[in-house]
Amino acid sequence: MRPALGNAGSYVHRGIIRAPAAYQTILFEVACICDDFPASHRHGTGPCMGWCDQTCQAYRPVLLDRTSVAWEALLAEASRVAWPEHFACDLFRDWQLLTQDNAPNAFVWALRRLGTDLLRADHSNVSWQAVLAGHHPEALWYVWGGGRLQMVTAAQAGRCLASSDRGQPRH
Ligand SMILES: [Zn+2]
Ligand SMILES: [Zn+2]
C-alpha cells in the first residue's frame, strides 16, 4: 500500500501513522473511512469483516487533515510517555473527537499502558472514572481545560468531573 499523506506532514503506511516531528514518536493505527481499523480488512481488498456490514471493499485510511491544540497536546504526551504500548488505535478515536467542530473544551484523559480513555466534562460519569481508576492503577490522569493539559492524580480527575457535573448543564 502506498503511504497516504496527511496535511500535518504525517503519513500512513499499512494503517500506522508515523509522525515526523521529533516529539511525536508514538505510532497509532488510522481507521478506514468505513470507521473499521485495518485488521478488519483483508490485505487491502474486501470485503471488510468489521462493523460496516461488508459495504467496504478496501482499506482507505482516513486523511488526518484536521488538528487541534488539545489533540496535539495529547499526541505529544503519548509520545513522551511512549504509551499506549498496545491499542494505540484509541489515539485515533481521541483525534476524531478532539478535531471535530463540537470538540469538548474540557475533559479528563487517562493514558494507559494499553489504551486511552477520554471522559468529557460535559458528559461526565464520575463513577465510571472511579471504575477505570480501579481497574488501571498504572494509568496516568490528565485534565484538559483552559487550553492546557495538566497531569493530576486519579482522585483529582474524579473531583474535576464531579465539579463540572454540578457547574454545567448536561447535554
Ligand atoms: Zn473500510
Ligand atoms: Zn469496514
Image (tube, grey):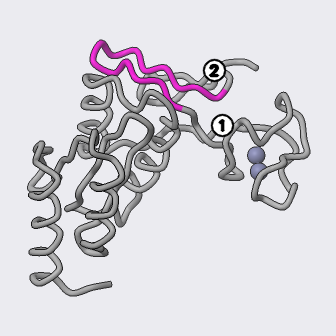
- Looking at the image, which is closer to me, 117 or 22? 117
Give the secondary structure at mark 2. Answer: strand
**Residue 58 image position (x, y, % from top left):** 83, 39
The residue type indicated by label 2 comes to His
Q: Is residue 17 left or right of residue 44?
A: left
Q: Is residue 85 left or right of residue 24?
A: right
> What's drawn in magenta, residue-wise?
15-28
The residue type indicated by label 1 comes to Pro
Q: Identify the residue position indicated by label 2 in the image.
A: 13
- Which quadrant, please, contains the N terminus? top right
Magenta stretch contains residue 165: no
**Residue 96 image position (x, y, % from top left):** 46, 51
**Residue 107 image position (x, y, % from top left):** 23, 60
Instruction: Give the quadrant of residue 97.
Output: bottom left
Tags 1 and 2 in contact by the CB under 8 Å rule?
no
Relative to 11, say whether 68 is above or below.
below
**What is the tally of numbered marks visible in this picture?**
2
Q: Residue at x 23, y 68 (%)?
A: 121
Relative to 94, say whether 15 is above or below.
above
Instruction: Give the quadrant of residue 30.
Output: top right
Instruction: Give the quadrant of residue 16.
Output: top right
Relative to 153, say whether 19 is above or below.
above
Q: Identify the residue position indicated by label 1 in the image.
A: 61
- Looking at the image, which is closer to me, 58 or 143? 143
Q: Is residue 144 left or right of residue 2?
A: left
Q: Residue at x 72, y 18 (%)?
A: 2
Magenta stretch contains residue 23: yes
Q: Residue at x 52, y 37 (%)?
A: 87
Mark-to-mark CA distance, 1 and 2 = 9 Å
Q: Residue at x 36, y 42 (%)?
A: 67
